[in-house]
Image (cartoon, rainbow, N blue to C red):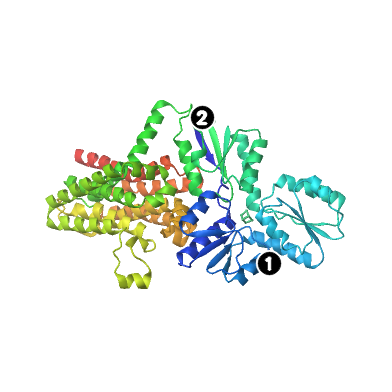
Amino acid sequence: MKIVIAKTAGFCMGVRRAVEMVLDTNRRGDRPIYTYGPLIHNPQVLNIFKEKGISTLDDIPERGDGSILVRAHGVPPDAKKKLDQAGFEVIDATCPRVIKVQTIIRKHAEKGYASIIIGDRDHPEVVGLMGYSGGNGHVVNNIDDLKSLPEFEKAILVAQTTQNTNFFDQVVSWVEHGFPHYKIFNTICDSTEKRQKEVKRMAASVDALIVVGGYNSGNTKRLAEIAREAGKPVLHVETEADIETNELTGADCVGITAGASTPNWIIRRVYRKLETMPSKAKVAWRQAAFSAQRALLLTNIYIALGAGALCFACAKLQGARNVIPQILISMLYVQSMHILNHLMGRKADRFNDPERAEFYARNQVLLFILASFSGAAGLFTAYTLGVVPFFILLMMSFFGLSYNLRVIPGELVRKSGMKRLKDIPGSRTVLIALAWGFVTSLFPAFGASSEHFHMGTLAAFIWSFGLVFARTAFFEVLDMQGDRLVGKETIPILIGARRSLQWLKILLLFLAATVFLLSASGVFTSLGYGLAICPILMLLVILANEKEYMLPGIKMEFIMESTIILSGVVTLIWFCLHARC
Ligand code: SF4
């Protein structure tokens, strides 16, 4: 089944901003935290807020304390005043585009204009807008409503920001014809407009459409309506659990779009569910290959193979020989640490990768045994190389295990507020890359025939570190919204997705050029010429994702991990060619 995701699907600027403001307030430790009314129309996000102790207040109490956030839709000005008078610290998360409409209405109301608002009477945004109209606001939801209005001497016409553009156009032509002296402001947010235009275009090219978003979200319902008008089967779902597998039987191409308050981790979960659904277009071997990819990724066997491949490549870059134990150590260590970290980090996987979270919950005992066995086998193999490699691996294992534990001493906790290594902003990406770098590039220098560290060892470490850093940070860019919700502070969250991707592209070009030049200068063996392909392919995966040729799912994860496995394949070819010489 071909799956396309609308470019405009998911959080709009205003909703993203409001969610981030709530999470920032929560992170600062301000207590208690409330939102005045549901912050956004998405029950899944609201449940997460509840779990974090952020409650929704529907009525303003006489006395209150703590912080209260005004939602993206805005509220009437007297509600804001009352919240303030009750004693709350009011944090205004009203979307700047809604503020613009409020300002238009307020300024004209002060000059005696009546305000005609095209929208849903009970929608919170419209209720808020009415508060700025100075008692002379009129909501119209259809042409009949409009016809029933008296003629005003002075009036403005505005729209709820998520209004259907077709209906707005109809109203405008009616008003221009009958009341040319009314002032018209097209206040439909361009995010809504683009979303609606895209769903129309998409409906023409797919067999069925899935619209993801809260059942009570106005803009999501409107997207579903527009798609239905195009005559295509439409499923409006809140999460992937609402998709009935038989509902899409026979569809070879399915489009996914989502409302402005749908987080991207829910869209990804819907995508993943579709990706795993059988389709008539999928031949048996493809289905089997897909299931195998999924199993290799879930069990971390593929990642372990990647570590082995990278160790082989780093060893041969340095000219080391007889490195089978070192390859085994890399595989066993990475397998063990990844399983343990997933077992301890299921909270974030619940959003970003629920299938993995379920797999780990179902098989936790078996996986724990596998991780312990891999860890012990890795240590034993390191011991066969000598006491020093054994102790280094032992320390790395302790370090890896302590990542999720409270190991930061009390004094530092008081000063920084961080209890665990994982609380250090950006630590995850750096520590994973460091661990891979050590185990894949430094271990080959122990006990192998090269027998010592040299410039090539350091250069191989940088190369391996860089490659794993880029892979890990790229996955973190994809997981940003889910990570943010569970309070993780990854590098993309700290510096933003766009900047992270820019830096990753530069890093990958640097790695490709470095491995090439170091081979040319003799620091690395000639293998470096071939290995330049790995960062280049990683870069192509990132670009393909940016251009939406490749969407985040099992296939893309598999391809990304394959760029690391490729280092082993290239090394094997190089090795066979040189062995023959
Ligand atoms: S749809 Fe537009 S106006 Fe409404 S919250 Fe989003 S960005 Fe703001």
* Residue 167 spot, x, y in % from top left: 74, 45
Q: What residue type is labelled 2?
A: Asn
Indicate the secondary structure of the residue bearing disc 1: helix
Q: Distance between the residues labelled 2 and 1?
A: 50 Å
Is label 2 or label 1 in front?
1
Taking the image as shown, residue 276 lies to the left or right of residue 251, namely left
Amino acid identity at mark 1:
Asp
Q: In the rendered view, does 579 fall on the left or right side of 561?
A: left
The residue beneath circle 1 is: 78
Question: What residue lies at 53% left-to-right and 31% top-to-bottom?
Answer: 248
Instruction: Give the percent coordinates (x, y) of residue 510.
Output: 38, 56
Name the disc covering residue 46, or none. Answer: none
Q: Where is residue 539 in the image (x, y as percent from the top left)?
A: 42, 49
Residue closer to the observer: 531 or 21: 21
**Is residue 372 in view from this perspective?**
yes
Dividing the image into four equal quarters, which quarter contains ligand 1? bottom right
